[in-house]
Image (cartoon, rainbow, N blue to C red):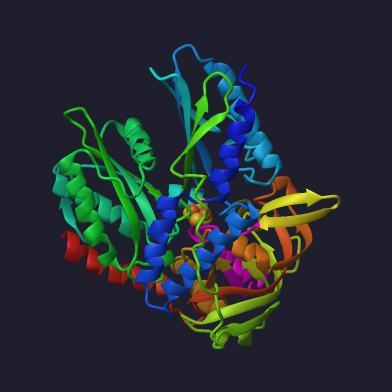
Amino acid sequence: MLPAFFDSVLQLIVRTSTDLPPDVRAAMKTALHAEPAGTRSSQALTIIAQNIDLAADGEGAICQDTGMPTFEIKAPVGANQIWMRQQIREAIAEATRRGKLRPNSVDSITGKNSGDNLGPGTPIVHFEQWERDAIEIKLILKGGGCENTNAQYALPIELAHLERADRTLEGVKKCILHAVWQAQGKGCSPGAVGVCIGGDRTSGYVHAKEQLFRTLDDINPDPQLAALEAEIMSTVNDLEIGTMGFGGKVTLIGCKIGALNRLPASFFVSVAYDCWAFRRLGVVLDAATGAIESWLYRDPSHPIVPMLDQAGFTRTGREVRLDAPLKEADVQSLKVGDVVLVSGRMFTGRDAVHSHLMKHEPPVDLRGAVLYHCGPVVVKEGDRWRITAAGPTTSIREEPYQGEIIRRYGVRAVIGKGGMGAQTLAAMKEHGAVYLNAIGGAAQFYAQAITGVEGVSLLEFGTPEAMWHLTVRDFPAIVTMDAHGNSLHKDIEATSGEHLAAIGG
Ligand code: SF4
């Protein structure tokens, strides 16, 4: 049909997964310069910047969670949408085979990973007809960590720290601020929000996500919404949630608001949160051949400007070296704020592994172990495995299990992102363990710290959910929950709550 269509879509997928658009790069550069050198947020942003450069240079996935592919397509009248959808599915499967996308499509009943990112509802493909004689395809890859921080409010509503949000633009503002506060660092801040005022519950979320296709530097054509976007951006950073929830000056890099008509009885505000790894690109295709006529959001004739013009993450000499497996004394000496460099053996484990360990003995000895909340991108080369992307996943999902696993099996350190809750903190204090916060999304950066894949257990759960046995060298992370009952996450949530009351109450 269109001989170049498949190849064009494949290029779009690979480029979107590996290279952030210039508007997002510019916003992240501004964030980098806003944080004073040497602060936790500044260190985290340096790692993020280094990761963005590594991904673009090596055409590797920016984040190991390559997300839910969502295509928005405008096609001329008469274009064969059935055929195009099938080609898109094949391109998704091919990008997965090449390790540019992680297998992310899981049967919701059986838990089985399809292995190729195809299944009911994946990928998401929306078509619209238009009068032009070209095909426009936009793609966003939005991961699970930020998707889980989406929020929807039915107004009027009472909100923590903000009292009542009424059916007014002031009420909408409160909802947006509340959503950002509630997300803390779990959605890999600094992020951007797409917002829909109105609609019904379903169309509200769809329209909120559509706002994320706007560039971060555009101006809303509706003057009232433009003013609200500007107001949010001028106040939201006073929350001081900062990068990864470490505290700091930059919490949000964009706020884009749309509106839909609603039923008189309903007033929803839907917020779609996207992380700093804001992967969104597009192409315009020749409708006769499917060849790329032009790119959207980026100009390929402009060379990619590196994020860092100096060295990346540099050591201060104050880092604490940890050699896994760990002894209790190793973790008792750590305190919140310490930067550690972990070397030795590390095991990955996320949702399926944690659930499994509640009912079965672990496949390996976890005494003294470092458990890494990570679902890596893995490729098989001959009979060996290679990890191509390996950043942390959101830890709070394991809160119902983590304390018990520490208690039963003697885990000494958990690495993840976004922090954990009161049960885990109590178990860490009781049994001598720490939580180490790695930088969410820094998948290429952390893949470099992995020196070997020694084995794998529970592969039947699929590659992201299996337990990988890794050897790492100088894997950097920050102690954010220590064995003495201290939690940076608890502290930042409390102080940012006070700021929320001050700016939005
Ligand atoms: S950067 Fe964080 S929130 Fe975004 S996709 Fe990666 S892990 Fe998920």
Q: Quadrant of the N terminus?
A: top right
- 56 or 123, which is in the foreground? 56
Horizontally, residue 51 falls left or right of residue 505, namely right
Q: Residue at x 62, y 85 (%)?
A: 330
- Tell me: residue 51, above or below residue 356: below
Q: Residue furthest top?
A: 78
- As for residue 13 lying within the magenta part, the answer is no
- Picture coordinates of residue 242 (x, y %)? 37, 67
Above or below: residue 5 compared with residue 117: above
Q: Position of residue 328 (x, y in %)?
A: 63, 83
- Say which quarter of the image contains residue 421: bottom left
Residue 292, placed above or below residue 157 = above
In magenta stretch: residue 391: yes
Q: Measuring 44% from the left and 51% from the top, which residue is drawn there?
A: 22
Q: In the image, what residue occupies the spot 65% across and 22% down?
A: 3
Answer with left or right where residue 346 lies relative to residue 424: right
Q: Is residue 197 left or right of residue 149?
A: left
Is residue 298 at least partly visible in the picture?
A: yes
Q: Which residues are magenta?
A: 389-414
Picture quarter with the C terminus? bottom left
Residue drawn 66% across and 53% down? 356
Question: Percent position (x, y) of residue 236?
Answer: 26, 60
Q: Quadrant of residue 184?
A: bottom left
Query: How far across and how far down the image is residue 279, in percent?
Result: 49, 47
- Identify whether 89 is placed above or below 240: above
